[in-house]
Image (cartoon, rainbow, N blue to C red):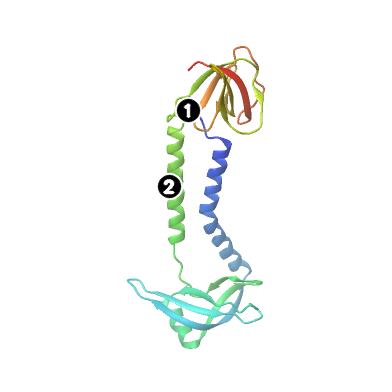
């Protein structure tokens, strides 16, 4: 029987998805807010520089007036060559900035790159591939154990254990990954144990922590 991921595994996957996509989402939201609620101002250009290469990049460094940015932080933006030339000559550049948040801005003629989107998509696809591989091969590295319950399945604190009590009698503790009329499968993390209830009861639901004493038969 192929087991699904545990709740902890799904939470970890969700956390990684958030970490991968958060920068792009934050950037998109900020850009939308600037476009929707920003105000147009003229910033003072302090410096301008070119990064040579096959596709040269043009950067302008500027600061806002004190009423826009009391801290007078020096900001930098990658711009098109025409904007770079105008800013270098006039020592000014047009900027749309979000009131109260000078870090959220868009320079007129700012150059945009799809690198962030490409990297995010590649990372998402890589994560998806790893999840699919883990789903396919999960449970194949170590065979599933089988046991026969000697008492009822009980709720317990979260955690996993396969503790020998006496001979072939074990305490099996983990997360319920499958429930059937006469059987329950308990996920131990690195393997699972299929417990035949053998007339005993199970009131523990799917993905809930459970424990049972059982005799292992394979």
Percent across and percent down for residue 19 are: 53, 52
Q: Quadrant of residue 173?
A: top right
Q: Quadrant of residue 160?
A: top right
Real-space Cα distance between discs 2 and 1?
23 Å
Query: How packed is label 1: few (under 14 Cα within 10 Å), some, or many (20 or more)?
Result: few
Residue in view at x 54 percent, y 62 percent: 27
Q: Which residue is denoted by mark 1 in the rendering?
A: 2
Percent across and percent down for residue 28 are: 55, 61
Percent across and percent down for residue 81 are: 41, 78
Outermost residue to the top: 199
Q: Nearer the viewer, residue 25 or 156?
A: 156
Q: Nearer the viewer, residue 7 or 62?
A: 7
Percent across and percent down for residue 170 are: 57, 21
Q: Nearer the viewer, residue 127 or 167?
A: 167
Q: Is residue 49 left or right of residue 207?
A: left
Mark linked to residue 211: none
Dot 1: element: loop
- Sequence-wise, which precedes: disc 2 or disc 1? 1
Residue 128 higher or lower than 209, as above or below: below
Q: Which residue is denoted by mark 2 in the rendering?
A: 126
Q: Nearer the viewer, residue 33 or 181?
A: 181
Residue in view at x 52 percent, y 48 percent: 16
Query: How packed is label 2: few (under 14 Cα within 10 Å), some, or many (20 or more)?
Result: few
Residue 205 higher or lower than 77, as above or below: above
Dot 2: element: helix
Residue in view at x 51 percent, y 83 percent: 46
Q: Are marks 2 and 1 in contact (CB under 8 Å)?
A: no
Numbered-mark total: 2
């Amino acid at each position: 029987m192929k087991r699904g991921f545990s709740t902890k595994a799904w939470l970890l996957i969700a956390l990684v998805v958030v970490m991968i996509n958060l920068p792009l989402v934050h950037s998109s939201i900020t850009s939308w807010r600037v476009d929707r609620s920003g105000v147009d101002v003229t910033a003072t250009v302090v410096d301008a520089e070119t990064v040579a290469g096959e596709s040269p990049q043009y950067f302008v460094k500027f600061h806002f007036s004190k009423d826009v940015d009391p801290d007078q932080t020096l900001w930098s933006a990658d711009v098109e060559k025409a904007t770079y030339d105008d800013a270098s000559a006039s020592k000014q550049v047009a900027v749309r900035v979000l009131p109260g948040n000078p870090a959220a801005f868009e320079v007129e003629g700012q150059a945009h790159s799809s690198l962030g989107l490409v990297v995010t998509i590649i990372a998402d696809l890589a994560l998806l591939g790893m999840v699919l591989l883990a789903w396919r091969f999960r449970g194949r590295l170590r065979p599933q154990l089988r046991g026969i319950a000697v008492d009822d399945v009980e709720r317990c604190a979260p955690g996993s254990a396969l503790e020998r009590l006496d001979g072939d009698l074990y305490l099996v503790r983990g997360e319920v990954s499958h429930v059937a009329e006469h059987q329950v499968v308990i996920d131990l993390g690195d393997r699972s144990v299929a417990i035949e209830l053998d007339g005993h009861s199970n009131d523990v639901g799917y993905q809930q922590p459970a424990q049972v004493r059982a005799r292992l038969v394979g």
